[in-house]
Image (cartoon, grey):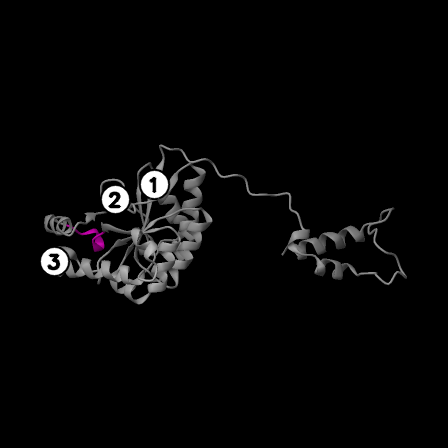
């Protein structure tokens, strides 16, 4: 794109009458004459210096923190695209993984953890945990943790990013779910700002609703699996830009120590 712009600019410049020399290189007969198109074609990115650089991002306000979470992954298509947006803004998140997905897409689990994000539990089959006895609950949660750890078996340095945070599917919990989770050493980790990306909401509408609800200590819910998440990828870019421009620090919800940063 830069080459096209430069070529057009130079062509317009040459088309305007003027006095003086434009190109001070070797003249006719030197054997080194180059056409304008050849000159442009030979230029590289390092030869082109633009004067328009990105403005420095605002410094985060220590009193303004939000916590970013993703449910229903990992997904080999959408999770990497979401990771690319997070890297763009130097942000990190907690990914609440479905066990069967973690078992199937192990490379994606590794990629998520390698980027500095924390990993958490969203059950193995996305069942309503309130309908299960302790045996069923322990299988859903225990098998998910094992699937995540198995995905990282060749990367022991990443195991510390597997947390003891549990987000029940559909956000449904009761006294039994809390008791079972505590029995297995887990903390229940919910959200308080739903972007509704799961509803197929347009990115601009997600942003508008998000801004209207934004305040410090919000736990933000996005999704990186389950279905087409193109709107999520686009909305995430808008949301992170807004957060940074407002001076927010963007953090994972669950720490590497395994507990939610603020009450779930």
Element type at mark 2: loop
Residue at 23%, 61% in the rendered image: 146
Instruction: Name the residue that disc number 3 marks.
Output: 131
Q: Quadrant of the N terminus?
A: bottom right
Residue closest to the eye, 41 or 259: 259
Quarter of the image with the C terminus is top left
* Dot placed on the residue nearer the N-terminal end, 1 or 3: 1
* Cβ atoms at labels 2 and 3 below 8 Å apart: no
Specify the segment rendered in magenta.
167-173
Gap between marks 2 and 3 measured at Cα: 24 Å
Horizontal side of residue 193 vs 91, given as left or right: left
Closest to the observer, 207 or 57: 57
Residue marked by disc 1: 66
At numbered mark 1, what does the secondary structure look like: helix, strand or loop? strand
Q: Position of residue 96 (x, y in %)?
A: 28, 54
Q: Which mark is residue 260?
A: 2
Measuring from the top left, give residue 155's x and y in whole percent.
34, 59
**Residue 226 seen in render:** no
Q: Earlier in the sequence, mark 2 or mark 3?
A: 3
Distance from Cα at disc 1 to Cα at disc 2: 13 Å
Q: Is residue 246 visible?
A: yes
Image depth: mark 1 or mark 2 in front? 2
Q: How dense is the environment of label 1, judged by Cα within 10 Å: few (below 14), some, or many (20 and up)?
A: many
Indicate which disc, 1 or 2, sits on the residue closer to the N terminus: 1
């Amino acid at each position: 794109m830069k080459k096209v712009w430069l070529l057009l600019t130079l062509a317009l410049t040459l088309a305007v009458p003027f006095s003086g020399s434009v190109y001070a290189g070797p003249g006719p007969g030197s054997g080194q004459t180059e056409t304008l198109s050849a000159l442009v074609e030979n230029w590289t990115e390092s030869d082109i210096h633009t004067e328009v650089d990105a403005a420095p991002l605002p410094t985060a306000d220590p009193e303004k923190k939000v916590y970013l979470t993703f449910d229903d992954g990992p997904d080999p298509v959408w999770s990497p695209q979401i990771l690319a947006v997070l890297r763009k803004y130097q942000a990190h998140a907690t990914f609440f993984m479905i066990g069967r997905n973690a078992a199937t897409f192990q490379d994606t689990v590794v990629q998520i953890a390698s980027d500095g994000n924390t990993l958490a539990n969203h059950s193995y089959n996305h069942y309503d945990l309130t309908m299960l006895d302790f045996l069923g609950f322990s299988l859903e949660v225990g098998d998910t943790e094992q699937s995540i750890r198995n995905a990282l078996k060749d990367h022991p340095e990443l195991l510390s990013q597997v947390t003891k945070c549990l987000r029940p599917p559909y956000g449904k919990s009761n006294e039994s779910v809390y008791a079972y989770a505590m029995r297995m050493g887990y903390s229940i980790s919910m959200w308080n700002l739903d972007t509704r990306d799961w509803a197929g909401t347009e990115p601009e509408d997600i942003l508008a609703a998000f801004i209207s609800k934004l305040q410090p200590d919000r736990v933000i819910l996005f999704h990186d699996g389950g279905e087409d998440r193109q709107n999520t990828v686009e909305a995430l870019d808008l949301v992170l830009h807004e957060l940074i421009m407002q001076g927010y620090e963007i953090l994972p919800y669950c720490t590497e120590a395994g507990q939610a940063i603020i009450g779930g």
